[in-house]
Amino acid sequence: MKFYYKCTECGLTFEIKPNVSLCPACSSAGQPDRPLRGVLETVCEGMPSASPFDDTSAFIHELLPVERKFFPPIPVGMTPLWEPTGLRESLGLNNLFIKDDTLNPTGSLKDRASYLVAAFARKYKISDIVVASTGNAASSMAGVGAAAGLNVKIFIPSSAPKAKMVQALQYGADVNLVDGTYDMAFDKSIEFTNKYGGLNRNTAYNPLTLEGKKTAALEVFAGMKRVPDHVFVPVGDGVILGGLYRGFIDLYEKGFADKVPVIHSVQAEGSSAINRALANDGFTAPVQSDTIADSISVDVPRNGYYAVSMLKKYSGTGVTVTDSEILSAQKTLASKAGLFAEPSSASVLAGLLKIRKSIPDDAYTVLLVTGNGLKDIDGAMKALGIEGV
């Protein structure tokens, strides 16, 4: 197998090695209040020897740009694909599935990216990782980094859920609270690595974050033994969305799949830059985020240009939901399926409910649930009327 980076805008290619992040030709045209320019995706040439159905884990590792021996000893990925009978019956969707990434080691899908970043760091003998996060990427990199024997420095808004901060601290990370937004934390982490070095894990900025998250798509395909018709994804920066597209595109280009699914970008009304750009044909000045779904709360979606381009190319849609719809869906997901998801993850059910009439009853539909509800209980407590208990 042959791997290399390719600019998602100009098509220039680059060797996969440390200190390669954005395309220098395109990133120079970027603006501070817009998504990153020159985001790199990983191209995988060749055919894997393993079958996606007979040995899914081996198949996935063959499609990743770091050899399996460098991955740390922590069980990331291969999460369950649920067939939620109660939810299926209540919605009238006979082929509804839940991809449950709350069962990754640190409780979120972000472990997929951290796992690949950690393997890359071990391969190149890099000991220091830096990351900005609203919480899940921080606790994820801290946990996976602990298993890999890495030093992890985190920049996180002081308003982030306490459970996520506690996680990161328990894993031994150096946690730096930022009195401001995720976007400010992102910028501070870049400044730090530019000055002091280390491998920056920031989403979109580090191409491996996009690549690591594609494994969720590969697992969905292997579990269903087909490509789903519809996939609902919680979207903030747009990297999970982009990663899913990368996975399904790999499957299609290598002849395993016959199509790329319709992917629905679900965003909170108070943080919907990608959906607005999709509807209005471009990004405008950022709007300050205001949503209960902290994990998808960003002013400037760093992977915005790539996410919008993929949605347009493959007929994806943008579904925007309110905080009240998210909290209602969180309760429904828990009471009908037995899955307690954090607000950002519950947004996918809110998105499905919003456009349910447009989804055929027999369509193979997947809800990608990305984070455990115990990571952020404030919203659920408010919705249940038990604040302060």
Image: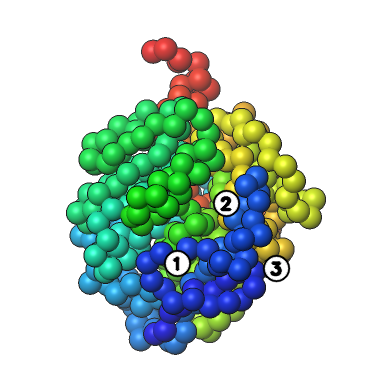
Residue drawn 32% across the image and 66% down it? 120
Q: Which residue is mark 3?
A: 313
Question: Of 222 and 87, which appears nearest the observer?
Answer: 222
Q: CA distance from mark 3 to mark 1?
A: 27 Å
User: Which amino acid, by three-letter code, is at mark 2?
Assistant: Arg
Density class for disc 3 (Cα within 10 Å; few <14, some 14-19, many ≥20) is few
Compared across the picture, whether 334 is left or right of 318 comes to: left
Q: Earlier in the sequence, mark 2 or mark 1?
A: 1
Can I make out residue 261 in this image? Answer: no
Q: Amino acid at mark 1?
A: Val
Q: Quick one: quadrant of the N terminus?
A: bottom left
Q: Which residue is mark 1?
A: 20
Q: Position of residue 89 (x, y in %)?
A: 56, 47
* Left-right relation of 116 to 69: right
Q: Position of residue 16 (x, y in %)?
A: 41, 73
Number of other residues with Cα within 10 Å of mark 2, as a class: few under 14, some 14 to 19, many 20 or more? many
Residue 107 coordinates in the image, percent (x, y) = 35, 44
Marked residue nearer the N-terminal end (3 or 1): 1
Q: Earlier in the sequence, mark 3 or mark 2?
A: 2
| Residue corresponding to mark 2 | 302
Q: Residues within 10 Å of mark 1 (few under 14, many from 20)?
A: some
Between the C-alphas of marks 3 and 2, the distance is 19 Å
Q: Secondary structure at mark 1?
A: loop
Q: CA distance from mark 2 to mark 1?
A: 17 Å
